[in-house]
Image (tube, rainbow, N blue to C red):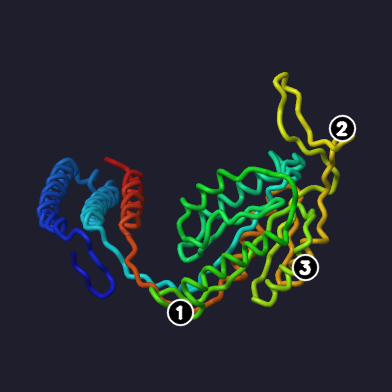
Amino acid sequence: MLEIVGIRLQNIEYLYLLAAVPVAVFLWRIALRRKGNFRGEIFGGNIQKLRVRRSYYLSLMGTETFKYLGLTLIMVALILALSQPQIETEQVVEERAGVDAVIVLDLSFSMLAEDIVPTRLQKAKDVIRDFIIRKRPEDRIALVSFSETSLILSYLTRDPENLLFYLDYMEPNYGTNIGRALKSGLRVFEREDEIRPQGNETNGDSVTNRIMILISDGEDHGRELEEAVKTSSAANIRVYCIGIGSRRAVPIPIGVQENGMRLYLQNENESRIHTQFSQGTLKSIADDTSARFYRAFVGFEMERAFQDIILKERELVDFKIIRYFQDIYYFILMGSLGLFLFLLTLDRQ
């Protein structure tokens, strides 16, 4: 490796091939001189022909000379490309703090509604899975599921595989108790404080923003919501809410009979129970915790919501300059190819 004033050559051993360049130039000069002597003999026998074609002769010799010079330059360029030249480059990048996010997912039967393809629940799980796979290494995620009861599936972790494992085993159940789900989310942060109190930067971990991301169709049948929202607000934990569901009332499929007939959730009168999205509860939760409410009518809006939430919560810590070496051999190869194609356009006589 050879480095000179911001330029680095990775494979300097190929530079020894430059010793062949003078030899090639010497051979091309001999070939050019022989061509000149041969053409001079042809024209020299007839003075009138020599005068008429002298301009053409000189032009032809100039073209040949230019071709050899071009081939020499291409040869040198290819040798330099083999040495893999690199140029030092600077890039200014932002340093942002990580985010501790508890994803709270509604597993009530109403999330099986098919007004969002394939279902509200499956679409939510797909978006969460994509978010987990693409998350930044410094972000920590926890998973909480809820219906009538609430379950902490995973505490805060940076390991995507651990999160994806639990995500695959989420199954719907009866009831919807958002308040209990928020309490479970708060319990995740309480446990984290027991293990590592906020402000402790052991192992290089700095203080990060703490948030919850609640995904639900908005229906709540519990009595613990008001208390849970007040506790979240007092703890300075923002609860971002993503409401999923169309505007219309839709039945709730719960299975398929042996004959292929769909089964739908019914009441005691054997009438189908319909679910309709309600945004009042979710919007109130977001407002009371200084967060934001997002609406997903067809599903894809959830992806943008996740991006917007995390971007808002990643605080700018500092700027740093990254210096690195960038390969430039492909520019040399492209230039050599262009010159070679140009030489091909010259008349061969």
Hey, what amino acid is under mark 2? Glu
- Out of 88 and 103, give the one closest to the viewer: 103
The answer to whether residue 91 is left or right of residue 267 is left
The CA span between labels 1 and 3 is: 31 Å
Regarding residue 54, the answer to whether it shows in the image is no
The residue tagged with tag 2: helix, strand or loop? loop
- Note whether 92 is above or below 169 in the view shown: below
Q: Earlier in the sequence, mark 2 or mark 1?
A: 1
Q: Which residue is mark 2?
A: 270
The residue tagged with tag 1: helix, strand or loop? loop
- Out of 60 and 177, give the one closest to the viewer: 177
Q: Which residue is mark 3?
A: 226
- Quarter-of-image position of residue 222: bottom right
State the residue at coordinates (11%, 53%): 20
Return the mark for residue 200.
1
The answer to whether residue 161 is left or right of residue 219 is left
Residue 185, given in percent of the width and then of the height, sits at 62, 63
